[in-house]
Each structure stands twice: as C-alpha cells, then as structure tokens.
Amino acid sequence: MQHVPGFIQNAEELKSKGVDEILLVSVNDPFVMKAWAKTYPENKHVKFLADGSGAYTRALGLELDLSEKGLGTRSRRFALLVDDLKVKVANIEEGGQFTISGADEILKAL
C-alpha cells in the first residue's frame, strides 16, 4: 500500500480513534496539490496542503535536496501524530524508503 492511498483507505478508522485531521503536506504549489487531490475521487477526509516555498518543511528540519535530479528542495517522507500541538509520534523515512510513515504505523501508535 502506498503512502497517500493508505491514509485515504484508513481514514475512517483513524477518525474513529480520535484523529481530527489528516493532512498531506507537500512542497508543491496549490494548483499541483488540487490536481493531485482530484486523482483520489473516493477521498473524503485527507486534506492536500501546499508548502510552496518549503518553509514548513524547513521549519520541521525535513527538507531533502534533490537539486541534482532537477527537483530542488523537497520534503522527506514522514508521518506525524500531533496532539494538542505536541508531536507524539514522528515517523521519518530515510532516503526514498516507505517503511514507517504509512497509515498502518500511525494506527499502531493510536
């Protein structure tokens, strides 16, 4: 299961366990994020948010320099579980891996 589909498919269960918001943040402009969101017509709960300048990503210390590949600064793949503005779980991937940042790992933490 890939990152975004996993959160969409598990949204109801996440919500039932007390998750108020499921936010997807990407270093992209809002037009790209809107188009990306439209590729998931079944999505009712995941909000796609643009971090156009990468300021949020840099503030978290999660920037990834992909300039050599022509992509500039992007974001590492991660999942945060936040409660009352405090990070309770920070699952941050290394490289291009997808092992700990999926919805299933957040469900385990709940």
Image (cartoon, grey):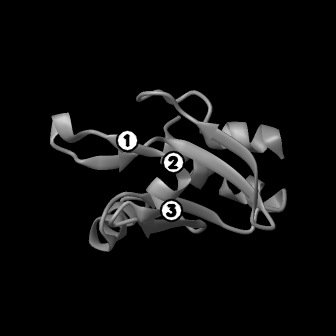
Please give the residue where the numbered disc 3 appears in the rendered image: 42
Position of 66 relative to 81 (above/below): above
Q: Secondary structure at mark 3?
A: loop
Residue 13 drawn at (x, y percent): 76, 53
Q: Which residue shows up at 81% across the image and 67% down it?
A: 84
| Front: mark 1 or 3 | 1
- What is the three-letter code of the residue carrying label 1? Leu
| Gap in angstroms between the C-alphas marked 1 and 3 | 30 Å
Q: Is residue 89 left or right of residue 75?
A: right
Viewer-side residue, 81 vs 107: 81
Q: Which residue shows up at 50% across the image and 62% down it?
A: 42
- What is the three-letter code of the residue carrying label 3? Glu
Q: Secondary structure at mark 2?
A: loop
Q: Earlier in the sequence, mark 2 or mark 3?
A: 3
For the residues labelled 2 and 3, say whether their Cβ atoms are less than 8 Å apart.
no
- What is the three-letter code of the residue carrying label 2? Gly
Residue 27 drawn at (x, y percent): 36, 57
Q: Secondary structure at mark 1?
A: strand
Q: Which residue shows up at 51% across the image and 48% down it?
A: 61
For the residues labelled 1 and 3, say whether their Cβ atoms are less than 8 Å apart.
no
Q: Is residue 33 left or right of residue 93?
A: left
Residue 59 drawn at (x, y percent): 51, 58
Within 10 Å of disc 1 (Cα), the crowding (few <14, some 14-19, many 20+) is some
For the residues labelled 2 and 1, say whether their Cβ atoms are less than 8 Å apart.
no
Q: Earlier in the sequence, mark 1 or mark 3?
A: 3
Residue 67 drawn at (x, y percent): 20, 41
Please give the residue where the numbered disc 2 appears in the rendered image: 61
Please give the residue where the numbered disc 1 appears in the rendered image: 64
Q: Is residue 48 left or right of residue 88?
A: left
| Gap in angstroms between the C-alphas marked 2 and 3 | 32 Å
